[in-house]
Amino acid sequence: MKKNILFLCTGNSCRSQMAEGWGKALNGNKYNFYSAGTKKHGLNPYAVAVMKEAGVDISNHESKTTDEIKEKMDIVITVCSDANENCPYFPGGKIIHIGFDDPPRLTKDLSDEEEILKIYRRVRDEIKEVIINLEERI
């Protein structure tokens, strides 16, 4: 039986969504991947765009909270420090923290689209590398 892996972030709009997308695309045959947030911020359009550039469609994902996840999680990976510090209890779930920069925070004062996308692409690619080497961490 495949293990359930949850990527947890604050708003479930960007990093956790990209991680879920990469997980399903690269390791979906080995694990069931989910994402959620401690809050719900909606799906980030830049995250959708840069994932699409990489050939992974997350446009159908929905932003959700941990209360909306009904499956038992075997592994919970927090992808931001806020989620790590405020991680809800998951009975029997192993909690792992792998932090990534927050693209919306890093780009909030930028107006150049290419500079904004560059930051999102960098974080997207960092998340991909973690997913490729996921078994080393879990």
Image: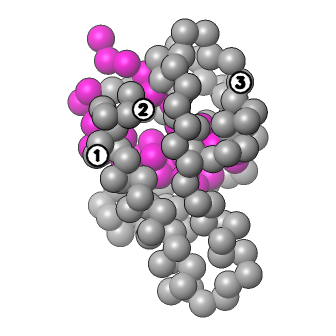
Is 83 displayed left or right of 56 in the figure?
right
CA neighbours of label 1 inside 10 A, class few (<14), some (14 to 19), many (20+):
few
Q: Which mark is residue 90?
A: none
Q: Residue at x 60, y 66 (%)?
A: 103
| Residue 106 in the image, given as x and y percentages of width and height | 66, 71
Q: Is label 1 in contact with label 2 (beta carbons under 8 Å)?
A: no
Looking at the image, which residue is at 67% across and 88% down? 111
Residue 1 position in % (x across, y down): 30, 11
Check disc 3: other Cα within 10 Å, few if <14, some if 14-19, many if 20+: few
Q: Which stretch appears magenta?
A: 1-30
Tell me if label 3 and label 1 are in contact, CB under 8 Å.
no
Q: Is residue 4 magenta?
A: yes
**Residue drawn at point x = 43 percent, y = 22 percent:** 4
Identified at 54% across, 16% down, the residue is 93
Q: Quadrant of residue 38?
A: top right
Amino acid residing under circle 2: Phe
Local SS, label 3? loop
Q: Amino acid at mark 1?
A: Ile
Q: Circle 1 sits on which residue? A: 132
Q: Residue furthest bottom?
A: 112
Looking at the picture, does residue 55 appear above or below residue 58?
Answer: below
Which residue position holds label 2?
Answer: 33
Q: Position of residue 113 (x, y in %)?
A: 56, 85
Tell me the distance, in whole angstroms, between the alpha carbons under discs 2 and 3. Answer: 18 Å
| Label ID, residue 88 | 3
